[in-house]
Image (cartoon, rainbow, N blue to C red):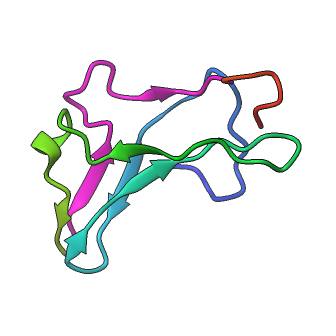
Amino acid sequence: RVSSTTRLVQGDRLRISIEAARTGYLYVINREEYSNGMSGEPILIFPTSRTRGGDNQVSVGRVIEIPTQDDAPPFFTLRKSRPDHV
């Protein structure tokens, strides 16, 4: 676990865990940030057909891991997509 102030660096591996506070549907979108303050295009990282067969329904107290422990690899590796990617 990391705090919200932890700085992640290129090469770090991570998995996102989200615990639902209420029943509903979960969408997780990645959007790169660049040093000039601009943002990249939004990329949907959850749900996908690989994770839970695309099922994004969540219920109270259920923990969702992205990627799942069954995925190969079961983590994201942070990489810069371009030199000014922060």
- Closest to the observer, 67 or 53: 53
In magenta stretch: residue 68 = yes
Left or right: 83, with 56 as reference point: right
Q: Count of labels shown? A: 0
Say if the magenta span includes residue 38. no
Q: Is residue 10 above or below residue 52?
A: above
Residue 71, by quadrant, is top left
The relative height of residue 80 versus residue 14 in the rendered view (above or below) is above
- Magenta span: predominant SS is loop
68 to the left or right of 43? left
**Foreground residue among 50 and 77:** 50
Residue 5: image x %, image y %? 72, 56
The quadrant in which the C terminus is found is top right
Image point 78% across, 48% down: which residue?
A: 38
Report x, y in % for residue 62. Answer: 20, 64
**Which residues are drawn in magenta?**
60-80
